[in-house]
Image (cartoon, rainbow, N blue to C red):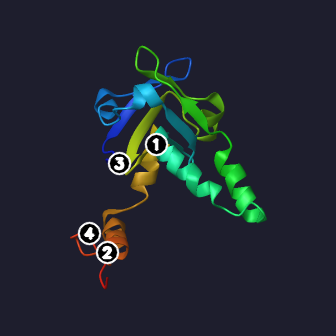
Amino acid sequence: MNYLIGEYECKLDAKGRMVVPAALKRQLPDVERDGLVVNRGFEKNLVIYTRAEWNKILKQLSRLNQFQPKNRDFVRKFMSGATELMLDSAGRVLLPKGLLEYAEVGSELVLACNLEKIEVWSKATYEKQLDAISEDDFSDLAAQVMGEFDMEGGHDGE
């Protein structure tokens, strides 16, 4: 899997359709054949997965012990709202109304690539999320999160 990159400002039409930006579409070579899956994110956002990435997640979920109530609760909550997206002939996807309401997405949104998935944010919420982390905080966060790794791809001490 190639990691996705980029940040794209998009608009929804009156029916809740969004044109997938050409630069993003180029990174998703199988999208027209396989489609995408959209789901609730952990913050007030949505997450779009390629079909291949979604199948990896389903495989992980299927390994959870369903006799454990917390596992059932997590799977139920995580899967609620998951919807297949297919591109139409104009390169648009229809984002489900219920998911748009959950993420409080109006007509303006941001698609923010995050490794192997695409986060969908209300433009205003995304800007607030980024603004909440000052440059000093970001520097400290980088040291905490990335400071344990050597930049050759390994983890210090391994």
Q: Nearer the viewer, residue 80 or 8?
A: 80
Q: CA distance from mark 4 to mark 1?
A: 24 Å
Q: CA distance from mark 1 to mark 2?
A: 32 Å
Q: Is tag 1's residue or tag 3's residue first in the polypeptide sequence?
A: 3
Tell me the kind of residue under disc 3: Met
Report whether residue 42 is seen: no
The residue labelled by disc 1 is 52
Q: Could you tell me which secondary element the residue under label 3 belongs to? A: loop
Tell me the kind of residue under disc 1: Ala
Q: Residue at x 74, y 64 (%)?
A: 70
Residue 83, quarter of the rendered image: top right
Q: Residue at x 58, y 49 (%)?
A: 58
- Nearer mark to the viewer, of 4 and 3: 3
Q: Is tag 2's residue or tag 3's residue first in the polypeptide sequence?
A: 3
Q: Could you tell me which secondary element the residue under label 4 belongs to? A: loop
Indicate the position of residue 2 as horizontal and vertical percent values. Answer: 31, 47
Q: Which mark is on residue 153?
A: 4
Indicate the position of residue 67 as horizontal and vertical percent values. Answer: 78, 64
The vertical placement of 59 against 158, above or below, is above
The vertical placement of 63 against 152, above or below, is above
Left or right, 55 with respect to 97, comes to: left
Residue 98, quarter of the rendered image: top right
Query: Local crowd at mark 3 within 10 Å, few (<14), some, or many (≥20)?
Result: few
Q: Is tag 1's residue or tag 2's residue first in the polypeptide sequence?
A: 1
Left or right, 90 with respect to 56, comes to: left
The vertical placement of 143 against 52, above or below, is below
Say if mark 1 contacts mark 3, CB within 8 Å: yes
Q: Which mark is on residue 1?
A: 3
Q: Is tag 4's residue or tag 2's residue first in the polypeptide sequence?
A: 2
Q: Which mark is on residue 143?
A: 2
Query: Local crowd at mark 4 within 10 Å, few (<14), some, or many (≥20)?
Result: few
